[in-house]
Image (cartoon, grey):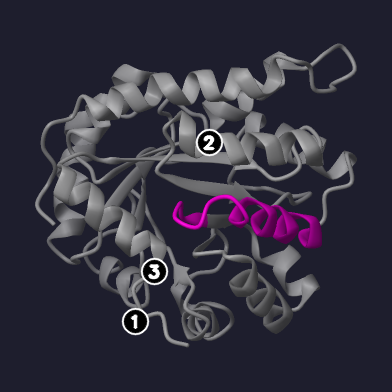
Amino acid sequence: MSSKKQTRIDTRFADLQEAGRPALVTFVTAGDPDLDTSLEILKSLPEAGADLIELGMPFSDPMADGPAIQLAGQRALESGQTMAKTLGMVREFRKGDNDTPIILMGYYNPIYIYGNERFLEEAANAGVDGLIIVDLPPEADEELCIPAMEYGINFIRLAAPTTDEKRLPRVLQNTSGFVYYVSITGITGAAAPDPALVGASVARIKSATSLPVAVGFGVKTAEQARAIGEVANGVVVGSALVTAIAKSLDGEGKATGETVDAVTGLVRQLAQGVHQVSHLPAA
């Protein structure tokens, strides 16, 4: 199987381009705060307004993540989340939704420990559409990126404000699905991005690739989502959602009757923001 075959990610972005609005890309950590609640959240995201879903693979040393996502990973690991359970969540999700793209996001170590070939085979069979592995540079494409392409899984690369003109072509070389532009240098959940600066950076990236560009890091509100959606093909929200989960938990860190609604309520607000966008950057 080759990644040249159209994936769910390709289809979703093409449909949204035709509709004239950006994608809302939501991130939650698999197994946070527990497997059952996390699966319920995952299943509820599309109806709430998520166009694509990033599902975090918990890892004990998430160096690029801010406190909110670090704590989400800790909660997941403490509740017994494993790679096998994360892939199982995708399989369960696919029983009721065969259209919404799911991207597994995280670090290479848990995949390496699981076994690359085993991981890719099971991920493809489960219905995973893409991977974002934040600590695998383009120089290591033979390790996971190229094999993922053979399984029809998009390998989505991060670009940042520090990605200069010399580096950008290398970053884009084997990227597929979309480019994830990290709008702020630093960890996740940092300050809100500046739409004007983001717009200039998105234009620079799009001059070098025909892929959609989704922008993340720092988006927390519907207004911010709308502003970023005016200059990008997609808006990624993660820290705000895992913070909503954290705030809904009881004194022992367990899920409550408000946990799922806390996430879906915020996703609905964010979706209203991106739905107000009436034009997109050129494809």
Question: Of the residues under marks 2 and 1, which one precedes in the sequence?
Answer: 1
Q: Is residue 246 left or right of residue 222?
A: right
Q: Residue at x 60, y 34 (%)?
A: 66
Residue 54 is inside the magenta segment: no
Q: Which mark is residue 45?
A: 2
Q: CA distance from mark 3 to mark 2?
A: 20 Å
> Badge 1: how crowded within 10 Å, few (<14), some, or many (20+)?
few
What amino acid type is highlighted by mark number 2?
Answer: Leu
Residue 92 is inside the magenta segment: yes
Pick out the residue farthest to the top.
Answer: 251
Q: CA distance from mark 2 to mark 1?
A: 28 Å
Element type where label 1 sits in the image: loop
Towards the viewer: 96 or 209: 96
Q: Residue at x 77, y 60 (%)?
A: 83
What amino acid type is highlighted by mark number 3?
Answer: Thr
> Badge 2: how crowded within 10 Å, few (<14), some, or many (20+)?
many
Which residue was labeled with disc 1?
Answer: 4
Residue 265 at what x, y percent from top left? 51, 18
Q: Is residue 221 left or right of residue 27?
A: left
Q: Is residue 138 above or below residue 93?
A: below
Q: Is residue 96 above or below residue 21?
A: below
Q: Which residues are magenta?
A: 83-102
Asked whether the beta carbons under mark 3 and mark 2 sit within 8 Å of each other, the answer is: no
Q: Residue at x 17, y 31 (%)?
A: 196
Asked whether the beta carbons under mark 3 and mark 1 sit within 8 Å of each other, the answer is: no
Q: What main secondary structure does the magenta stretch of the protein show?
A: helix
* Tally of numbered tags: 3
Residue 50 at what x, y percent from top left? 44, 38
Residue 127 at what x, y percent from top left? 57, 65
Element type where label 3 sits in the image: loop
Q: Which mark is residue 7?
A: 3
